[in-house]
Image (tube, rainbow, N blue to C red):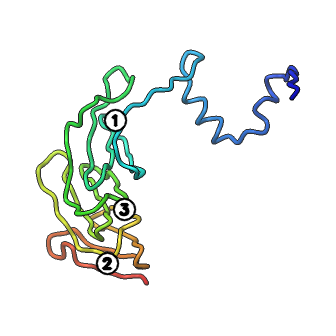
Amino acid sequence: MTCEHTETPPLNRAAGIPVKERVKVSQNWRHGRCRRETVLKWKCNLMPWMEMDGEYLYLSQAENIQAYPLCPDGTGVQRHPQAIFSGHQEDVCRFVLVNSHIVSGGGDGNIVLHKIRGSYSVKFSAHEQEVNCVDFQGGLIVSGSRDRTAKVSSVVPAAAGAALGILV
């Protein structure tokens, strides 16, 4: 095997690399070196869902969502969660952060609405199989499931949890 080194002008080095990949790589580097560090570890074989706001990293682990405070100096996250949001009987498949709420869809077919800075959670029986996608806006929860349905549910007190529409 022969290796050759050719000097490539700086402008041509990134020509074949997609912009998305260049941005991803560039954000991994600080002060000219790549920081490879494991922030959190767990003993699950499942891919977690993650979301960040300005103060916390929210991470799904099995049937819970854990809130890890971000370090003030911007170097990572604290090792222990400050809050744990639960309510599913099976793994959390997907969740979203909207204003002061977390809306999660689980493998149990349920949707759970959590108040981030409070102690209440509301569970909706939404689907017959796992919830693969969920979103929340203006008092409406939109969800899609492996059961091949998409549902629009209301969280306003008069119709809380009621399916307003089902798309099959």
Relative vertical location of residue 31 with respect to residue 19 in this rendering, above or below: above
Q: Earlier in the sequence, mark 3 or mark 1?
A: 1
Q: Secondary structure at mark 1?
A: loop
Q: Secondary structure at mark 3?
A: strand
Spatial distance from mark 3 to mark 2, Cα to Cα? 18 Å
The residue lying furthest to the left in this view is: 119
Q: State the mark number for residue 54.
A: 1
Residue 52 position within the rendered picture, expressed as x and y whole percent measured from the top left: 37, 41
Q: Callout 3 environment at 10 Å: few (<14), some (14 to 19), or many (20+)? A: some
Mark 2 residue type: Glu
Locate residue 37 relative to residue 57 in the image: left or right: right
Q: Are marks 3 and 1 in contact (CB under 8 Å)?
A: no
Question: Where does the N terminus fall, quadrant-wise?
Answer: top right
- Can you tell which of label 3 and label 2 is closer to the viewer? 2
Mark 1 residue type: Gly
The residue singled out by tag 2 in the image is 128
Q: Residue at x 40, y 71 (%)?
A: 144
Q: Are marks 2 and 1 in contact (CB under 8 Å)?
A: no
Spatial distance from mark 2 to mark 1, Cα to Cα? 35 Å
Q: Earlier in the sequence, mark 2 or mark 1?
A: 1
